[in-house]
Image (cartoon, rainbow, N blue to C red):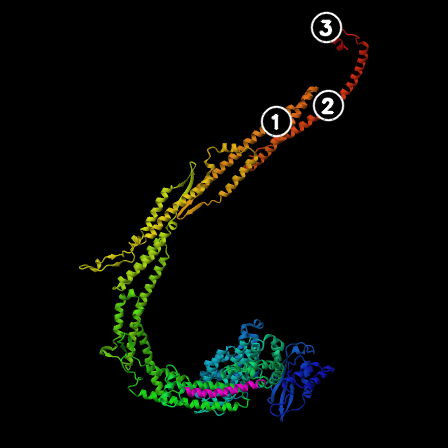
Amino acid sequence: CAHGRPRRHFLRVAAAMSSGADRRKAYIAQCAVNILGTELPPHNGATWSASPADLAAQVMAAPAVARFLEEATAFVLQVACVKENERYDLRITNASDRDPRSEGAALFTKCSADPITDANVHRVVLVSHVQGSPLEGLHALLHNVYSPLLCDEGSEWSAKLPSESRSLISQVESALNAAKHGVGARGTPAADEDDFSQIRTPADECEHWRLLSQEQPYGGRVDPTVVARAQDLWQVLEPVSAAVADFENLSFPDALDALEELRDALDRLWSQHRYPERRMAHLMRVVGAAVDSFVKHKLDAVRVWKDPFLRVTRQLRDGSALAERWAGACHELTSRLWLGGDHPWFGGPFRDPALESLVQRLDEVLRLRVVHQQLDGVLDDAEARELGVDAVFDAFEGVPPLHHSEFARPRWAAARARYQERMDAIEDRVAAKLKPQLAGTGAKPQALLREFMHYRELIARPNIKRALTAEREMLLSQLEGHLSSLRDDFDARTGVLLESAAAAGAAGAQVGKNLSGVVHKAVLTRQLLARTAEMVQATDALMADLQGADRFRGKAEDLTAYLRDYGDHQFEEWKEDVDRMLHDDQEGLQLTGKLMVINQEDASLVVNFSDRLVQFLREVRQLSAVGFPIPKAIEDQAAVANMFYTQAVALRQVTNTYNRLNEEMIRSQKPMLLDEALRFEKIATNPTAGASNATIAWKDKEEVRRYTDDVHKACERLQDHIRKLRRTHHNFGDEVQRLMATSLLHQQDAWKAAVDELRRRANNVEAAYRHGCKGWRNHWDVQLYKALEVQYREGLETLHSTLPPIKAELTFKHKQLLFRPPLEELKTLYYKKVKEFISVPTKFKGLQYYDEAKAGESEAQKRLMTLSIFREMPDRCVDSLLTVYRQSAEVFRKLDDLAASLEPWLALGRLSDLDEFITKHCTDVTQWEVNNAALKAKQKESEKIPDTYKVDCVTVSLLPFKAALDDQYARMRGALAGSMKAAFEAQRADVEAFIAGAKEALKLPPNPTYDQISAARGARKDLDDRRREAEVGMRSLREKQKMLASASASASSAPDLTQLEAAWDELAEGIADFDGEVGKIMEQRKAGISDRIEDAEKKIANFGQRWFALKPKHIPITSAAAMQDVKAQIEAL
């Protein structure tokens, strides 16, 4: 439903819908009365037959509505607005035909066969509006709604429609468009140029005349004369038709160009084809509306209040400039260009209020953004946050800034009022901060004015303007005084206040540079006028409300009038002076005299062109630039003088070349350029006219042009030769400079190739310039000598280190450290290479040159010569040669030092018998371990010895030396291992012998006697002492075995103590068994002895008894025989 409908009408409809009435009918009635606008007064003074509510009730009660809702075959419902007797009433039918009295109708159609309910009525029933021509309505729906939906490639509905159907829709749209333009709303032919009711865009106007310009438009219903006129008009509009058709998608610069082209097209339509005034005014309004839409469309992509300042202001200024350009173009056409002639404009200057309103709104928005930007320059961040500066534009939230119609203005005014409320506190703070800044104590008026203009938009705010009244009055008074000082300064500078004319002339001559006094004064008046206008403009913008503003404006007008009168008077004097000189043959403005003359003082070439004529051209340009109208006669003379001035400038360039010829030529190349220089001098110093040989003067226009061309060509030819030779010279210099960095020792081939190339180029140059090349070639031979000497001396002084590498080896043979090749051969080779380098300059030929032919010799008999300085170079470098021989001796001393430094490494290699030495000095495990560790450390240290050792240019390979060291270390490692293994085997034999002896000693016979046991125990005790010694030997064997295992390449080659360890363990067990067996025997013997003791004791007792019983009482021992008898008797007892 439309906005703005009366609330009372909707309340009634809502009440009807809630009171049990048919909601479907209420929906139809609501749509119909809103579409027909029954709540709005008719535009032609007529009235409605009933109130909106009664009309809605009439719709709800109509039988046609009930039939449409209830009957499936009733597909159409039409509610038409019919006018009868100045009253509007409703006509409700189920027919689609149109009543001739109808001025609009609401049409309802069914899009589905479903029964209509209050829930689906808004989906089943389609609502449309017919107003005016059905062709126009259908074309509008197709063009704006259905064609984009069904025919655009990006639409989802387009894929559901065959391409033939889309083509048919496009054809129907084109046919409707043609029919719409072919027949007006009242059925009159389209040839009626006052009927522009169908023209809504500039593209419509172009399309209208395009269709009419066809050979047989609309079935031949238009008169052929109309077609011919349409073709003429279309020919004018066709160049701009593409731009206006795509106007909204153009950029601002392209849109500006399109408006310029359209403005020219409208001018041709009016001036050449007598375009109707009413149609032209309508077309201007349509273009203005297109500009309005264009600007709004462009600014829709910008957030006016939030985007960066520069981006927004650029868009706003571009939009304002575009609108002002079109408004200005229309005003210029209708107020000045179209007022006269046989087809004048009668309607007064054209104004487009909508476009003017757009410009005002754009300017207002721009001012608001500028004010906000200037606030950032006055307030710091803390103050801005405190005052809520960033939130002031929230007042415009929801208010489109570029909607400027009379209906949108109240919302804009309300938003602006809210904005001002937020700005009041901010403006008070800003005014307080600007006061000291604009106090202007000691500041000049112009500087103070610039400060005010810097904050122009801020100061223009009413609150700030009131707060800064005192500062503005002070500025106004200073500007008023400045006007007086400008007047006094002008009078002083121009000599108006001087008493005598001569003094005035002197004062005038002192002002300005390269201008006459009169011209300078005229230009000065224009400059002061511009400054005065600037002050007046600032006063009108910032101080128009002050009391002294009118007085200031009056003084400014008086000064403006005075300066303008004085400037015009000076300009008149200048015109008279120029006119007099133009007609006086003796003055310098006449183009007479020779073109060039020779200055007798320095023999330089001078262009004979009047300096007064140059000043005349400068004055014309200056006066024209500041706005003085130059008379046509003076302009013509200036154009002629300017044409010859161009020739004179070209000739002066040539003379400068001639006069600087000696500076531009390279000294050694001057003899080579002699012929070309003489040719140029002949042409330049003899300006004659063709075959007549008459001297050329400035008045000979064609001859001057020809002479200038000849001299210019000759100059170019000479400069070409100079540049060519200079380029060759510089190339030679680059190549020689490169040779200075090219090693003569290592890159002799590069030297030879470079010198050969330079010689080839020199020969080519000599072929082109046959005379005077000897000096130039000698010059470059000298430069080559310098480059050769640099590299020669550098090579000599670094020869010992930069000679091609000489290879040698250090070997160890026959227990001596020797060089291979021997040192004497190295010296021979070294000095041979030194001699080769020393003799290089003696073979150097340089560029060479041909000696002058002697008497009787032909050119072919001339001899190639080489400068002797190359052969003399070694004699000139004696000090460097001495350095060479000193450094050579140093090289071989370093070689001797190298050999001496490596001698200690070979101490083992010089032993006669390494095995004997090791066997003698390595007797225990610790010594073997120490020597093994020392051997590994020494071998690791030897790995740090480099493979090669560079002694300047001699590269000594130490690989043979290191191989000898490795062999020496391998032999020592083998000797250590052999010695250790021999000691191991000897010690193992001792232990094995001990074990075998021990086992034998521990053997007991069966039933050993006490003597045997005692002897075995003695052997066992002795075995303990020897076993401790054997245990030391076993530990030593284990250590040796471990060391030999670590030194062996594989585990299988390491010595094995398994059997010995088993035998040792078996010995330990045998000793234990022996001790046990002896103890057991002794226990057994001990038990037997007790019994025997007891038995013996019994026997003793018995013996004693028997003894005492049987013993002789007296044994006579008289002889030995008797003694023996007694003994036998005792033993028998």
Cβ–Cβ under 8 Å for marks 2 and 1: no
Find residue 587 and report its horizontal and vertical position in percent.
30, 85
The kind of residue on which mark 3 rests is Ser
Number of other residues with Cα within 10 Å of mark 1, as a class: few under 14, some 14 to 19, many 20 or more: some
Disc 2 or disc 3, which is closer to the eye?
3
Q: Which residue is mark 2?
A: 1082
Magenta run includes residue 400: no
What is the CA distance from the residue labelled 2 to the residue labelled 1? 27 Å
Which mark is nearer the camera, 1 or 3?
3
Q: Decide if residue 842 is in sight here.
A: yes
Q: Which residue is mark 3?
A: 1119
Q: Are marks 1 and 3 in contact (CB under 8 Å)?
A: no
The answer to whether any part of residue 168 appears in the image is no
333, above or below 378, in the image = below
Which residue is identified by label 1? 994
N-terminal of the two: label 1 or label 3?
A: 1
Mark 2 falls on what kind of element?
helix
Q: List x then y, in percent, for residue 185.
A: 55, 87
**Could you tell me if the residues under marks 2 and 3 are in contact, i.e. CB atoms within 8 Å?**
no
- Residue 277 lies, with reference to residue 940, above or below; the image says below
Residue 643 lies in what quarter of the image?
A: bottom left
Q: Few, some or many C-alpha atoms within 10 Å of disc 3 (few <14, some 14-19, many ≥20)?
A: few
